[in-house]
Amino acid sequence: MELRTVEGAMVKVDSSKHIVSNGKPDPEIYLQRSISKRKKGDYISAIKDSNKFIELLPNDARGYTSRGFAEKSLGKFDEANADFSKAISLQPNEYMYLNRGLLNLDFKKYKDAILDFDKAIELDPKFSTYYRYRAVCKFAIGDPIGGCLDLDAQVKLGSKVAQKEMQKRCK
């Protein structure tokens, strides 16, 4: 075991080059560093730390999600999609579907995004933002009726923004 300075902090590093805490590799450090680096725009380093986290905890969706966000920021759709899909397989919840849905929306894969937002809505029908994103996709593919229905659902959940958008687009 040796001491090293990593990101300005002294840490213990074992022979496999893992940061350790209490004598064991500490995956949480890698995850938190990945998130921090991603927020600073250092996506390559964020991916490297996510890889270390995944190496230590391959069945934890957080590593794939964190890496997916970094890959998305680099414009790597296929890699990000694979990671978000893996995260969904490990922890299928509305947030995981939202993440992949937003990826699909950003890359103009509207039909795939709609499927993800459908699933998010199925899991949490009271969260109005899912309807908003799905409405954006429906308008983008030329389905104004579907888009207006989603805006209406969002209005019924209390969204003032959706109400203004509905007045503008759904006459």
Image (cartoon, grey):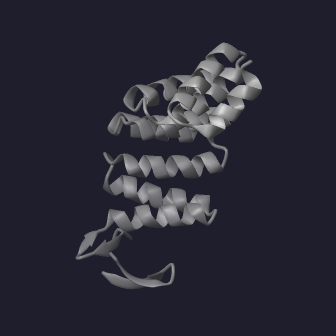
In the rendered image, which quarter is residue 12 located in? bottom left
Residue 3 at what x, y percent from top left?
Answer: 37, 85
Residue 6 at what x, y percent from top left?
Answer: 47, 79
In the rendered image, which quarter is residue 162 located in? top right
Q: Does the image show residue 165? A: yes
Viewer-proximal residue among 146 and 56: 146
Residue 57 at what x, y percent from top left?
Answer: 31, 53
Q: How many numbered marks have been drawn onto this rendered protein structure?
A: 0
Which image quadrant: the C terminus? top right
Residue at 38% in and 30% down: 123
Residue at 43% in and 65% down: 32
Residue 28 at what x, y percent from top left?
Answer: 35, 64
> In the rendered image of this protein, does residue 154 appear above or below residue 68?
above
Residue at 37% in and 36% down: 93
Q: Does the image show residue 143? A: no
Position of 45 compared to 32: left or right? right
> In the rendered image of this protein, does residue 50 appear above or below residue 6?
above
Position of 167 compared to 88: left or right? right
> In the rendered image of this protein, does residue 160 appear above or below residue 123?
below
Viewer-proximal residue among 113 and 22: 113
Which image quadrant: the N terminus? bottom left
Residue at 38% in and 68% down: 29
